């Protein structure tokens, strides 16, 4: 197949591209390199059936041309990371809503199957744990920039599902829960690569808030495996599903585990949210996915534990240092 991957030079996108190439597909990557990098595609952007186009999904004419030539579209292009969302809210909203609209319009025009990577952020302040795809969502006030990302991604979901309802355009929506692995940067607030680099460099491991908030972390190998399998799953059309790992850990426990596995002497330091992100920052206390739906559709089962994730990230960061 000829597969278009928007955001394919990003962390998850680059892993997906490698898997698609290994299966013999031809891949076109459309990425403006705002958060993706050439280095993420190192070793595969060499004529091995991969073509990188450096431009934005906001370029409607170019998007239309790329979609027309594709057999399938993975739409991963998006603002990414809490730090970027807080610092650049206009770019966050424009790149998410406008870009997705362009891609979906072209997919509808040429009847191209479309997969949207959404986020667990759309569950907002939901307190029913684990999060199930049909749960109500509870958002914070529009004056809190954090929620612009969640609302923009929720609007993407509404739009994709509207195309399914009106014209039966084959769309699939996935909500990713804290995907981690090699090539992920801590530059935009990703917690595991940030902790690992701090520990390896002997700097304080900075835990935001009181550290009792918990998250679940999925290895990028498991996530990409699910994205790949969903391409051929017609039962997933018109559906929203969680992808992640349901092994839960508090951020303080995570910091201690990183310190132990790196053999670091770093101290663990609590940093108030107000100091890290400014006044009025909102966070959710727990975020755990219910994986029953995707398990029933493609037999999804995470194969990589948190320890596996940390070993891979530590080995990569240590090699770079």
Image (cartoon, grey):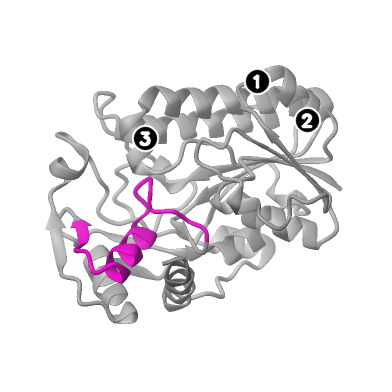
| Quarter of the rendering occupied by the C terminus | bottom left
Q: Could you tell which of marks 1 and 3 lies nearer the N-terminus?
A: 1
What crowding class fits label 2: few (fewer than 14 Cα within 10 Å), some (14-19), or many (20 or more)?
many
Residue occupied by mark 3: 85
Q: Secondary structure at mark 1?
A: loop
Q: Is residue 6 above or below residue 225?
A: above
Q: Rounded to the nearest whole Å, what is the CA distance between mark 3 and mark 2?
A: 27 Å
Q: Is residue 13 magenta?
A: no
Residue at 21% x, 67% y: name it.
252
Q: Is residue 91 above or below residue 16?
A: above
Whether residue 300 sits left or right of residue 274 in the image: it is right
Whether residue 239 sits left or right of residue 70 in the image: it is left
State how many labels appear: 3
Q: Rounded to the nearest whole Å, what is the CA distance between mark 2 and mark 1?
A: 11 Å
Q: Could you tell which of marks 3 and 2 lies nearer the N-terminus?
A: 2
Q: Secondary structure at mark 3?
A: helix
What crowding class fits label 1: few (fewer than 14 Cα within 10 Å), some (14-19), or many (20 or more)?
few
Q: Rounded to the nearest whole Å, what is the CA distance between mark 1 and mark 3?
A: 21 Å
Q: Could you tell which of marks 2 and 1 lies nearer the N-terminus?
A: 1
Contact (Cβ within 8 Å) of mark 2 with mark 1: no
Q: Is residue 194 magenta?
A: yes
**Residue 127 drawn at (x, y percent):** 29, 50
**Residue 248 drawn at (x, y percent):** 35, 68
- In the picture as drawn, the residue positioned furthest to the top comes out as 61
Q: What range of the chain is rendered magenta?
A: 183-207
Residue at 59% x, 33% y: name it.
32
Q: Tell me the number on the disc at residue 59.
A: 1
Residue occupied by mark 2: 66
């Amino acid at each position: 197949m000829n597969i278009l991957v928007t955001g394919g030079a990003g962390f998850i996108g680059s892993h997906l591209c490698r898997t698609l190439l290994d299966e013999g597909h031809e891949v076109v990557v459309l990425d403006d390199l705002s958060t993706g990098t050439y280095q993420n595609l190192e070793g595969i952007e060499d004529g091995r059936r991969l073509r990188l186009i450096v431009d934005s999904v906001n370029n409607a004419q170019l998007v239309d041309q790329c979609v027309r030539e594709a057999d399938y579209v993975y739409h991963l292009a998006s603002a990414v990371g809490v730090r970027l969302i807080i610092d650049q809210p206009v770019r966050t909203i424009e790149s998410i809503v406008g870009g997705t609209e362009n891609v979906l319009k072209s997919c509808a025009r040429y009847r191209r199957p479309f997969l949207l990577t959404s986020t667990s952020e759309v569950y907002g302040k939901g307190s029913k744990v684990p999060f199930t795809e049909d749960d109500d969502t509870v958002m914070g006030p529009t004056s809190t920039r954090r929620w612009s990302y969640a609302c923009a991604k929720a609007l993407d979901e509404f739009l994709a599902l509207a195309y399914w309802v009106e014209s039966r355009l084959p769309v699939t929506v996935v909500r990713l829960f804290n995907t981690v692995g090699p090539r992920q940067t801590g530059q935009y607030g990703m917690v595991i690569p940030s902790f690992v680099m701090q520990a390896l460099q002997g700097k304080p491991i900075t835990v935001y808030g009181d550290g009792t908030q918990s998250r679940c972390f999925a290895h990028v190998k498991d996530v990409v495996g699910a994205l790949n399998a969903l391409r051929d799953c017609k039962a997933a059309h018109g559906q929203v599903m969680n992808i992640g790992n349901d092994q839960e850990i508090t951020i303080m426990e995570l910091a201690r585990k990183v310190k132990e596995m790196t053999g670091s002497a770093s101290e663990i330091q609590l940093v108030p949210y107000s100091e890290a992100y400014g006044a009025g920052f909102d966070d959710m206390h727990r975020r755990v996915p219910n994986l029953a739906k995707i398990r029933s559709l493609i037999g999804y089962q995470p194969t990589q534990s948190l320890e596996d994730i940390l070993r891979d990230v530590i080995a990569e960061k240590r090699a770079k240092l």
